[in-house]
Amino acid sequence: MDMAKRFTLPEAQSLIPLVNRLLLEAIRLKPDFDRAAGELAKMKERIHMMGGSVVDRPPFVEVKERRDRASKGLRQAIQELIDLGVELKDLDSGLVDFPTLFRGREVYLCWKMGETSIEFWHGEEGFRGRKPIDQDFLDNHKGDRTQ
C-alpha cells in the first residue's frame, strides 16, 4: 500500500510559508557545503601527493567541521520537507510537489519558490506538463482526509 501523504490544495497552501523557509535554509547551506567539500577534496589530494603525511592539521579539521555543519543543516532541512510529505524535485530552483488525488489517480500540486501560491498541478509528466488548477480540479481532487 502506498503510504505517501496526499494533500488538498488548502492543506498544501497552508504549508507554503514553512516549505519556503526550509528551502531557503537548504539553499543557503548548499554553497557552504559544496565549497567546504571542494576544499576538503583538494586538501586530501595534496596530502596524498605528499605521501600521506598531514602537514597542517588544524585547517583540515576546520574545513571538515565546516562541511559537516553545513551537511547536517542541509540534511535537517530536507528531512523536515520529507517529514511533511513534500517531494523536493529541484533544490536549486526551489521546486516541490505535494501529492494529491485527482479523479482517483495520484497527481501533484506543483509549487516553485517565488510563486505566491500553488496554481498548477501535473501528473507523471512533471514540471513541463504543469496545468493550471481550474474548477474541475478543485471539485475532483482530494487529500488523505475526507473533505
Image (cartoon, grey):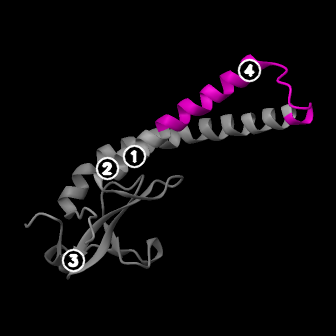
Residue 127 in the figure: left or right of residue 46: left
Q: Which residue is mark 2?
A: 83
Residue assigned mark 3: 137
Callout 1: few (<14), some (14-19), or many (20+) C-alpha neighbours within 10 Å? some
Pinpoint residue 60: horizontal percent, then vertical percent.
73, 25
Neighbours of disc 4 within 10 Å: few (<14), some (14-19), many (20+):
few
The residue that label 4 is drawn on is 59
Relative horizontal placement of residue 31, taking residue 74 as reference (left or right): right
The magenta-colored residue range is: 48-73
* Amino acid type shown at disc 4: Pro
Q: Which residue is mark 1?
A: 79
The reply to whether dot 2 and dot 1 touch (C-beta < 8 Å) is yes
Element carrying mark 2: helix
Confirm whether the magenta stretch covers residue 137. Answer: no
Please give left or right for residue 39 compared with residue 81 in the image. right
Q: Are marks 1 and 3 in contact (CB under 8 Å)?
A: no
Name the residue located 82 percent from the left edge and 24 percent from the top edge. 54
Q: Residue at x 23, y 78 (%)?
A: 102
Magenta part, dominant SS: helix
Q: Nearer the viewer, residue 66 or 142?
A: 66
Q: Amino acid at mark 2?
A: Asp
Q: CA distance from mark 1 to mark 3?
A: 29 Å
Residue type, numbered disc 1? Gln
Pick whichever of labels 4 and 3 is earlier in the sequence.
Answer: 4
Q: Position of residue 47 (x, y in %)?
A: 85, 31
Q: Secondary structure at mark 1?
A: helix
